Amino acid sequence: MPLPPEDTPLYNHPLAALEEWLRELGARQQGAHSASWDLHLPQWSARIDLEVEEVKVSWHQEGSETVRLFPYGLSRADAEAAILAGP
């Protein structure tokens, strides 16, 4: 499925497009129908949860956890930049 332009708010992405975007980031879905995704980078790992009202990102680094909530009104580019910036 082609992704909408990167400046499109997340709420204008069909679920399949959000899932494709997360796959392209390198995240892996926790189960076939799960709304939770795991992303592992050398410096940290993150759990990304597609919740009803927002996207919840929990970064794990050196035994500590940082949690942030991002509204679906964010553009995909801004959400991606925030996620990849890490904790």
Image: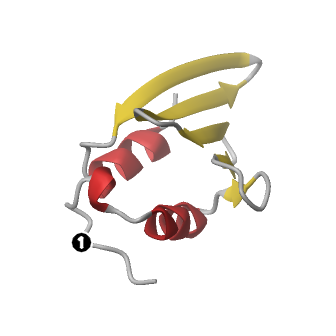
Q: Which residue is rendered at x = 79% and y = 55% of the image? A: 31
Q: Which residue is rendered at x = 68% and y = 28% of the image? A: 60
Instruction: Look at the picture and state if 4 lies above or below 75.
Output: below
Q: What amino acid does circle 1 point to?
A: Pro
Q: Nearer the viewer, residue 68 or 72?
A: 72
Instruction: Give the percent coordinates (x, y) of residue 87.
Output: 52, 27
Q: Disc 1 designates what residue?
A: 5
Instruction: Give the percent coordinates (x, y) of residue 45.
Output: 68, 39
Give the quadrant of residue 29: bottom right
Residue at the far left in the pictured view: 7
Q: Nearer the viewer, residue 49 or 57?
A: 49
Give the quadrant of residue 53: top left
**Which colouring convention does the figure follow?**
secondary structure
Instruction: Give the percent coordinates (x, y) of residue 9.
Output: 24, 53
Q: Which residue is rendered at x = 74% and y = 22% of the image? A: 62
Instruction: Look at the picture and state if 65 lies above or below 59.
Output: above
Residue at the far top in the pictured view: 64
- In this view of the protein, can residue 44 be seen by the observer? no
Marker count (numbered): 1
Q: Which residue is rendered at x = 62% and y = 63% of the image? A: 26
Q: Secondary structure at mark 1?
A: loop
Task: State left or right for residue 41 relative to residue 11.
Answer: right
Residue at the far bottom in the pictured view: 1
- In this view of the protein, can residue 87 be seen by the observer? yes
Q: Nearer the viewer, residue 37 or 24?
A: 37
Instruction: Give the percent coordinates (x, y) of residue 73.
Output: 24, 42
Q: Residues within 10 Å of mark 1 (few under 14, many from 20)?
A: few
